[in-house]
Amino acid sequence: MNENEPVAMSPARDCLRPLKGHEVVRRGDFVADNRQGFIPWAGPSGFRAGSFVDRIYRQRKGSLAEARIQK
């Protein structure tokens, strides 16, 4: 991996909303990382967000804020 390449793209905090317990997790959702940023969800999809220990986030519809790069 080249050190000049970004490791992950992460949306800004105000572009995300936490999923409600009954919403189904899918590809494209995010979880918080240890550096107060967000990383793409890499686990299975198709289960309810309320059954997972950590909060899962989804981009808000119509959000035009730019993604920031996490290194």
Image (cartoon, rainbow, N blue to C red):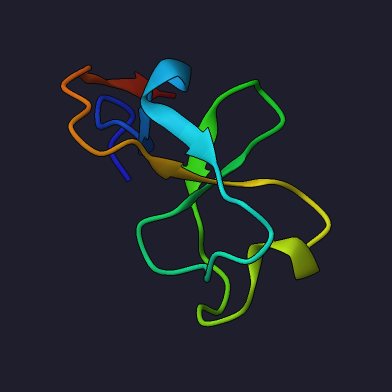
The residue depicted at 36 percent of the width and 28 percent of the height is: 11
Task: Report the side of 39 relative to 54 (left or right).
Answer: left
Frontmost residue, 21 versus 33: 21
Quarter of the image containing the C terminus?
top left
The residue depicted at 66 percent of the width and 22 percent of the height is: 35
Relative vertical location of residue 51 with respect to residue 21 in this rendering, above or below: below
Task: Report the side of 47 relative to 17 (left or right).
Answer: right
Residue 26 percent across, percent down from the top left? 43, 69
Frontmost residue, 28 versus 6: 28
Relative vertical location of residue 71 with respect to residue 41 in this rendering, above or below: above
Q: Which image quadrant is residue 3 in?
A: top left
Residue 68 percent across, percent down from the top left? 31, 19
View extreme (right): residue: 53
Task: Report the side of 9 relative to 71 (left or right).
Answer: left
The residue depicted at 22 percent of the width and 17 percent of the height is: 65
Relative vertical location of residue 21 with respect to residue 47 in this rendering, above or below: above
The residue depicted at 44 percent of the width and 31 percent of the height is: 16
How many numbered marks does the figure carry? 0
Residue 48 percent across, percent down from the top left? 64, 72
Residue 63 percent across, percent down from the top left? 22, 27
Frontmost residue, 10 versus 8: 10
Task: Report the side of 33 relative to 38 (left or right).
Answer: right
Relative vertical location of residue 8 with respect to residue 64 in this rendering, above or below: below
